[in-house]
Structures are given as structure tokens and as C-alpha cells.
Amino acid sequence: MLEVKELHAYYGRSHILQGVNLQVGKGEIVSLLGRNGVGRSTTCMTIMGLVPPHGSIRYQGQEIAGLKPHEIARKGIGFVPEDRWIFPGLTVLQNLQLGQKSAKRQGRWRIEDVFNLFPRLGERSNVHGGLISGGEKQMLTICRTLMGDPDFIMIDEPTEGLAPMMVEHIGRLIEEIANRGISVLLVEQKLSIALKISQRLYIMGQGRIVFEGTPDDIKNNQAIRKEWLEV
Amino acid sequence: MLEYIIFSLLNSLVLGMLLFMLSSGLTLIFSMMGVLNFAHASFYMLGAYFGYQISTAIGFWPALIIAPPLVGLFGALVERYGLRNVHKYGHVAELLFTVGLAFIIEEGVNLIWGRNAVTYPIPKLLDFPIFTLFNTEFSAYRMFMLFISVAIFIALYWILTRTRIGLIIQAALTHPQMVNALGHNVPAVFMLVFGGGSALAGLAGVIGGIFLVTEPAMAATLGPIVFVVIVVGGMGSLTGAFVASLLLAAIQTFAVGIEYSLSDLLALVGIRAEVGGILKDLWRIQLSHTGPILPYLFMVLILMFRPKGLMGKRET
């Protein structure tokens, strides 16, 4: 579904991505792990076209490197940023409505689905996005991207700063997303949740992929965990 | 006294709403694109000259319809083929680009229409006093200006809060990258907002050129006040721009009619100011003479004590 080859990216003169190679298959949950600052978020931003890419990004057989972010989104790629980027002056409902690519197009996810899945968002549908809690913002940012009906979604650090119960909730949502046939690239720091829900995992270090394997491969390889994941 | 208050209020409303027509576009462009458009008042001037030129050929009413979209189109082209290319070099380059553009427009106006003010009269249909109160007349044209600017205010509010494109604009004020990543064509929205803001400035020029004066210096006269409005209101806040437009217009309008000086004020509390000494001129300055500097004084105070402006969310 998504194939990234020799991807490089720069912020000014800093060489952030130094030849990233990864693949995500249809309906797969793939996690991208690694310590802070190794380029995991930049990988997502570059695939989304928000950072200029150097290298190849193929999506459903088509080269998308160099397309504008809205063109990439319209190919069926969704992005949930680490900073959530909730529109503070718009209500929860309006935030969700803007997730839809057009007012008429109806995708796999409807606003009622979101409110059934997260009744709390339904209760607060008329509250401004700037006034809801961190957990609610996280649900909203994921659901907003889902409203655009992506076939492949990149979710950056969805559990950061959330209470354990909310982390479990987000984990279940990601599984539900995959159950509906959507491929997921999950950027996570919490190893436990990544190991629990992913089929495959990549570990990044210094702008490159340094390890690729299944959850069992990582569980059984203490050296890799120690070298690239543990602080 | 009542006459002075009522007419000053009405006149500040007319001037304030005209300022809002200019500042709303400027503040929207700034918050969305981070561009402080120094040429914004030049679009206002272009509106006045286009309005004047079309008026002399086919009359004021067609000019009112044709001139603002023409200025809007010019603004959209400036964004598409000028600013968008300069954008990659950062905000300083963009700022310098708009400063250069303001000079080009001013010199262009000088070349085409000359250095003197042109005669851009009130349309005949509106050239009568709409009411007389305490022997003072209020012209129908001023009432018309008020009507147009209130209609624009309502239309702008409706578009921004009730339409999908309005929601996209509001969202792009805070997180344009996210709006783009959700599949909306943000560069096209930028062009639309820049063009729309320029058209509003153009409309302000078409009607304001008659009310004030249509001359090559008009952009330089009103431009700084519009900047004061958006700094005082809070950069990026439309409500702030609205409040500050009315407030600054009221300060200027009311100050013009108040002839009290500092010594009069001190006399009220029983202090006699010295008639001699180095400060003798200071005591005698009447408030009416300070009218033109009051907005800037207000801006300096706002920057010192509330840098994000009355209703702004970010530091100026």
C-alpha cells in the first residue's frame, strides 16, 4: 500500500531523514518506534508533503513524493499530528466537519459513528475545540482525520500525556480503524501498546530504520531494545 | 453639547466602519499567511482611483460594483504570482515585497492621475442632508457609507461563521498545515482571502475616496492608522479589529472638537499651571490639536502594557 524508499528530508541545513525505507501493507498496523528526535514525526510529515521529500514515496503504486499535502490527502492518506492541531475557535462538530473533504462526500465514518464511539465528544459537540481536555482533543484529532475517509492513516504519538484508561481507549480505536480495512502507521513511544496492537514494527535511530521485525522479535531481543529504545 | 456628542458618535461610526473594512482584510491576511501587508492601504487607494475613473466614464453606481472586484483580482494576482514566489525566502522578504509594491502603486498612481487630488464628487442621488438635528445636517452620503459598511460587516460575519469556506478560513488562521493535510487547498484559500481582503480595501476606497480625499498620499495617510487598528485590536482578531476601529475613530473624532488644554484640566482640580517657564507651551496644547497623534500614543501604550492587543491571541 505504502512504500518508502531512500527518503531524505532536511530542516534548513539539518539532515533529518537519512535514507528511510519502510512499507505498510493493506489493513496492517505498523509501528514506528524510537527515541525522541530520531525523525519519526518528520517521516510522517514528509510522507504527508508537509516537509519537502527527497526520495521515493509510492502509494498504491503511484509516486506521491512532490505532491502538495491536499493532493496527498485526496489520494486517501490521513495524518494525525503529534501536536493535535485542533482548531480552537471552531466547535467539536465543526472540527469534525472540516475533516470531510467535501460537504457532500460521505465516507466510511459518519459523525454519528464518532459520537457513538466517543459519547463524550457528542456531549461536547458545541464546545469550542480550545476548551476540551487533552484526552478529548486526542480523540477529536483522530476522528477528524477519519472523517476524511482515508485508506491509510499515520497517527503520531496518540497516547502522549494521556491517562492509562485513555491510552487503552485509543488502542482500541486504532484496532477498530484497522478492522475497517484502513492501514495504520503508528508512531509510538509506549512500547507496550505498540507491541500489543501492531503486526510489524520499525525502530528508527539517527534518521534511518535500524531494525525491522514483529512484536515477538522485539520482545526477544533485549539488545535492540536497550540500544535504540530504552532511555 | 448633546449635538456635539450625537454627531461625533455618528461620524466616528462612519469612520470606524470604514477603518474596519480595511483592517478586517489586513488582519485576516496577517493571521492566515503571517504577511504584514504594507500595500494594503495602496489597494484602498487603487479602489478610490478605479472608482473615480469608472465614475467619470459611466457613473458612480457601476463604479461601486466594478471597482472592488477589479482591485480584488489585482490582489489575487499579486498573491499568486508575487507573494507565493517570495514566500520561500521568509517573512522579511514578504514584508519588503509589500513595501516595494506600495511604492510602485503610489508612483503608478502619480504617473497616471498626477500628484494632485482628483475631483471625485458625491453622487447626485446622495447629495442631500438626510436629517437635520439642532441645526446641523447629516449627509445622506455618510448614511450610505454606514449602510454599506454595516452590510459588509454582516456579510463577512455570515461567510466566516456559517459557510464551509468560512470554517476553512477560520481553521487556517491557527493551523494551515492541518487544514492542508485534511485535503483542503490552502494556497487557493490564501489567494481567495488575499483577493477578498484587497476587494474590501478597494470598496473602502471607492466610498472613502469621496468622503475623505482621492490623492496619491491617501494610502500613506490612512495606512498607518489601519496598522494601529490591528495592533490595538490584537493581530489576527476580527472582533479586536472591529472594536479597535470604532474606538480609534471615536478617539480621533471626539478629540477634534474638544478644546480643553492641560492647564484647563488642572484648573478644574484647583491647580494653577505656570504661564511661564519651559513647559508653558505644554500647558496650552488643546486636546483637539493632539487628535492625529492619539491613536499612535494609544498603540505605544498597548504595546507596552498588553502586547497581544485588546483581543489578540499572540504577541505582536
Image (tube, rainbow, N blue to C red):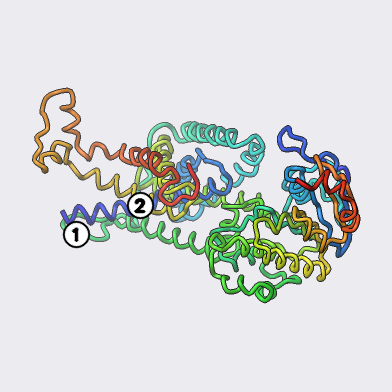
Q: Chain of mark 2?
A: B
Most foreground residue, A57 or B258: A57
Amino acid at dot 1: Leu
Q: Is residue A32 left or right of residue B180?
A: right
Residue appearing at x 87%, y 42% in the figure: A6
Q: Can you say whether A79 is above or below B301 in the image?
A: below
Nearer the viewer's eye, disc 1 or disc 2?
2
Q: Is residue A96 visible?
A: yes
Most foreground residue, A207 or A90: A207
Percent across and percent down for residue A130 are 55, 59
Q: Is residue A53 left or right of residue B210?
A: right
Percent across and percent down for residue B272 are 9, 35
Most foreground residue, B232 or B201: B232
Label pair 1/2, CB-CB below 8 angstroms: no
* Label disc, if present, on residue B238 of the rendered structure: none
Q: Is residue A62 visible?
A: no
Q: Residues within 10 Å of mark 2 (few under 14, many from 20)?
A: many
Residue appearing at x 18%, y 55% in the figure: B3
* Label disc, if present, on residue B246 of the rendered structure: 2
| Image-quadrant location for residue B266 | top left
Report how many numbered discs are placed on residues in the image: 2
Residue appearing at x 29%, y 44% in the figure: B252
Q: Chain of mark 1?
A: B
Q: Is residue A17 left or right of residue B70?
A: right
Residue appearing at x 80%, y 58% in the figure: A194
Q: Which residue corresponds to mark 1?
A: B133
Q: Can you say whether A115 is above or below A1 in the image?
A: below
Secondary structure, mark 2, is: helix
Counting residues from the start of the chain, the first of labels 1 and 2 encountered is 1
Amino acid at dot 2: Leu
Most foreground residue, A95 or B88: A95
Percent across and percent down for residue B219 are 43, 38
